[in-house]
Amino acid sequence: MDTTAFKRSERIEHRAEPGEAEFLVEDLAERMQQFGFPVTQVQRLGDQSKEAAQGAAIFADGLAGGPSAPLINAMRLRECSGTVLDWISLPQAKQIRNMYKEA
């Protein structure tokens, strides 16, 4: 598996509105090229695993210093903190965060 490229799944094509997927894929490719990473599509391993699981394995490999480490370093994942809930900017943001803290 090529670990020098940014992997994307087909999920974007399934979830995006008609015409949006091409724009998103092209925009992602342009942005990642700035860091020297071509964008390639994840090749599913048949019915043995899901694309998200394969992506998680690539991240784990990179965080452990394996062949995917250059990608993880370029994405600055070791510097990440907080949760996705930190980025909610709706008026109900505090209420939403509290719902997840209680769970």
Image: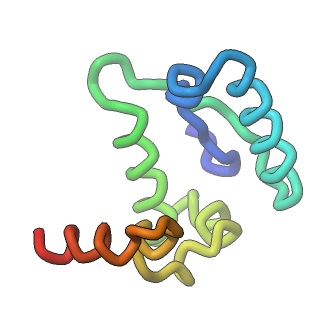
Q: In this view, does 1 lie above or below 13?
A: below
With 41 as the anchor, is 33 left or right in this view?
Answer: right
Query: Between 20 and 37, which is closer to the camera in this rendering?
Result: 20
Residue sitting at 52 percent across and 79 percent down?
Answer: 80
Residue 13 location (% of width, % of height): 59, 22
Q: Is residue 81 above or below residue 87?
A: below
Residue sitting at 59 percent across and 26 percent down?
Answer: 16
Q: How many numbered marks, from 0 up? A: 0
Q: Is residue 80 above or below residue 84?
A: below
* Rendering quarter of residue 79: bottom right
Residue sitting at 24 percent across and 76 percent down?
Answer: 98
Residue 9 location (% of width, % of height): 54, 32
* Rendering quarter of residue 95: bottom left
Residue sitting at 73 percent across and 36 percent down?
Answer: 24
Query: Between 13 and 61, which is closer to the camera in this rendering?
Result: 13
Viewport quadrant of the C terminus: bottom left
Viewport quadrant of the N terminus: top right
With 4 as the anchor, is 94 left or right in this view?
Answer: left
Residue 3 location (% of width, % of height): 61, 49
Query: How is the protein colored in the picture?
Result: rainbow
